[in-house]
Structures are given as C-alpha cells and as structure tokens.
Amino acid sequence: MGWARKGVLLASNAKLASVTGGGERNYAGTSAAARVEKRRASLLDAALTEMAEGRWRSVTVASVCTDARLNKRYFYESFDDLDQLADAVIDMVAGEVGVAAIGGFIKTAESALHDQASSVVAAVVDVLGEDRRKALVLLGGVSTATSQDDKRRAAISGLTTVLVDHARKIHDVALERDSLAATGPAFVIGGTAQTILSWVNGDLPVSRDQLIGDITALWLALGESASGIARSRIEPEA
C-alpha cells in the first residue's frame, strides 16, 4: 500500500473517531453502548416471558437468545449465565415497582393519608397490572429455581422495609418496640401481593379502580388497627 493511500485511510479514521467521540463507533446513529443496552433489554424481555410462562427450568442460553432474536454470542456481553439473567429480571421488576411506589408517595406527600396510600397502591397496581408477566414473576405466581425464589423474597422484603419506615412516620408510634413492626407490614405486603396476583390471573372480578380502592381501604384499616394495638401494648409499660 502506497504512503498516499495510507494517509487517506488515517485521515478517514481520524474523522470517524472525532464524529463518534473517540474510540466508540456509531452504527446507524446508535452508539455501541446503546446497542449493548438494547440487546440486554431484549434478553431481559425474553427471559421475563419464559419465567412468567413457567418454562424457565428448561430454558437454555441458545433458546433465550432465539426468543430475543440475538446471536448466542451476545448473551455473554451482558450476563455470565442464566441465573444472573433471571436475577436481573427480578431486580428489574422490583426496581420498577419500588420507583413507582416512591413516585406515588412523592406526588401526594402533602396530601391526606388516604390520598398518599391510594397513590402508592395505584402506582404498584399499574406496573404489575399493565404487564401480567411482571406480577407473576415478582409475586411468586410461577415456579422458578431456588435461587430465584430467594431473590424474589429479598425483593419483597425490601418493599416491606419501605412500608415499615413509612408506617412509623405516619402513626408516630415506636413500632420497633412491638412485634407488629415485623408482622404487620409483612401481612400487608403478602396480602397485597396475593390480591394483585389473583386480579391479574382473572380470579378477582373487580375493576382496576375497585382494586385500588379496596387495597387502599384495607391498608389504612390495618395500619390504624396495628398502631392502636401497639400503643395499647406500649403505654402500660410507660
């Protein structure tokens, strides 16, 4: 190759590098990082479907890549194995639910307690109700591997912790001194999860608004009752 031709190629490469921000090339206007993220999202979506439909125990890297319409080699740019992919699916759904719940609370932080609870419940119901797969995977509506069951329990436990902290602020009572600090929120979260799961499966013949209204009413009633019981247990000790 002549020096002149080499010079043209070097100049061309330098121009490409300047356009793409240095070492990362754009393809059809999309950066390499964005393409990786898109492929990762496709794998997560394919895995979510397999998990929700109860086929996860028979899934292979090749089959999930086929469902995602990706070459098998792209699996390993985002995940080490199938367990890591399944964990990522649960983390994704739990994260969406958590963000929605917090967003629902922030929107109504200065509103009445009923409005706060209703906003949070609506946000959670919409995330899980608009995509039935997410409810089935996060709330235990399908069978998965033991490691995913552990991951799911950890995610639910995290949501319970958020509810505990919120209840303490609302009811202004030292709930940490009473056993209801643990059993109350766990009961509420567990009952809410089963109710939403029954709804997305079509076993509860109620509308979205009715579901939100009923769960909200039960949250408030149980919260008030639990705080009253806790106070009655604490006050004699004062």
Image (cartoon, helix red, strand yellow):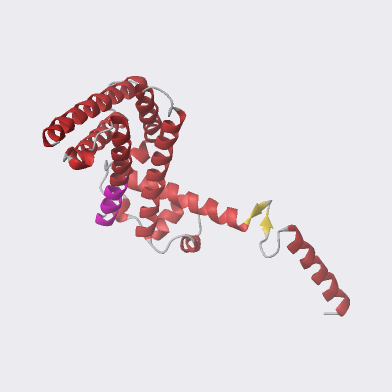
Locate residue 159 relative to residue 188 in the image: left or right.
Answer: right
- Where in the figure is residue 115, as x and y percent of width and height? 38, 23
Q: Which residues are magenta?
A: 146-155
Does residue 203 appear in this view?
A: no
- Residue 67 is situated, as x and y percent measured from the top left of the image, at 44, 50
**How many numbered tags mark residues here?**
0
- Which image quarter holds the N terminus? bottom right
Q: Residue furthest left?
A: 236
Q: Is residue 85 or residue 116 the one in the foreground?
A: 116
In-front residue for pair 95/24: 95
108 to 84, vertically: above or below: above
Can residue 65 be seen in the rendering of this structure? yes
Q: Which of the 4 image quadrants contains residue 233?
A: top left
Against 118, is 83 above or below?
below
Nearest to the observer: residue 168 or residue 83: 168
Instruction: Tell me what residue is drawn at x 11 percent, y 33 percent.
Output: 236
Quadrant housing residue 185: top left
Residue at 31% x, 38% y: name it: 163
The x and y percentages for residue 221 are: 23, 24
